Amino acid sequence: MTFRKRKKSIYKKADELSKLCDIDVCLIIYEADQKKGRAIQSEKWPQYSAEFNRIFNKYNASRDIHVPGLKQNFDLSDFYSAAKKEDVDRKFERLYPTWDDRIDEFS
């Protein structure tokens, strides 16, 4: 019951956001099986397949293009992969420094 109320509220907020900011918004919501804890059903918004596919394809196409001044799409998987790469780089540099400051003192 609570999930259905929240889902209805999210759809309403997405609709308001798309109208007020004049942007394309689409949602994919997974409903989980309470006993097994895995996704059993997905719903999409907007419900019209053509509109949803247009927005989703536009998003996928924009991820491949880098235009100066245009904000790049960045999702959670991008964030975690970038953070993980930075952590690995920092650990590698700590274990295997690329430059030793004592070399600057050589004549």
Image (spheres, helix red, strand yellow):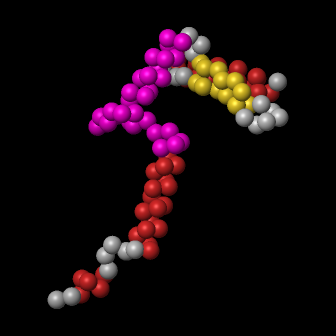
Q: Position of residue 84 (x, y in %)?
A: 50, 55
Indicate left or right for 22 with 45 as reference.
Answer: left
Vertical placement of 83 versus 33: above or below? below
**74 part of magenta stretch:** yes
Q: Residue at x 48, y 49 (%)?
A: 81
Q: Position of residue 35 (x, y in %)?
A: 83, 34
Residues shaded magenta? 49-78
Between residues 15 and 52, which one lies in front from this camera angle?
52
**91 part of magenta stretch:** no
Image quadrant assignment for residue 8: top right
The mark tally for this picture is 0
Between residues 38 and 77, which one lies in front from this camera angle?
38
Is residue 30 visible in this depiction of the protein?
yes
Q: Position of residue 3 (x, y in %)?
A: 76, 27
Secondary structure mostly taken by the magenta-highlighted segment of the chain: helix
Q: Residue at x 76, y 22 (%)?
A: 4
Indicate left or right for 47 with 23 as reference.
Answer: right
Q: Position of residue 20 (x, y in %)?
A: 52, 20
Image quadrant assignment for residue 54: top left
Indicate left or right for 14 with 104 as reference.
Answer: right
Vertical placement of 34 versus 45: above or below? below
Image quadrant in which the C terminus is located: bottom left
Vertical placement of 27 versus 73: above or below? above
Image quadrant assignment for residue 31: top right
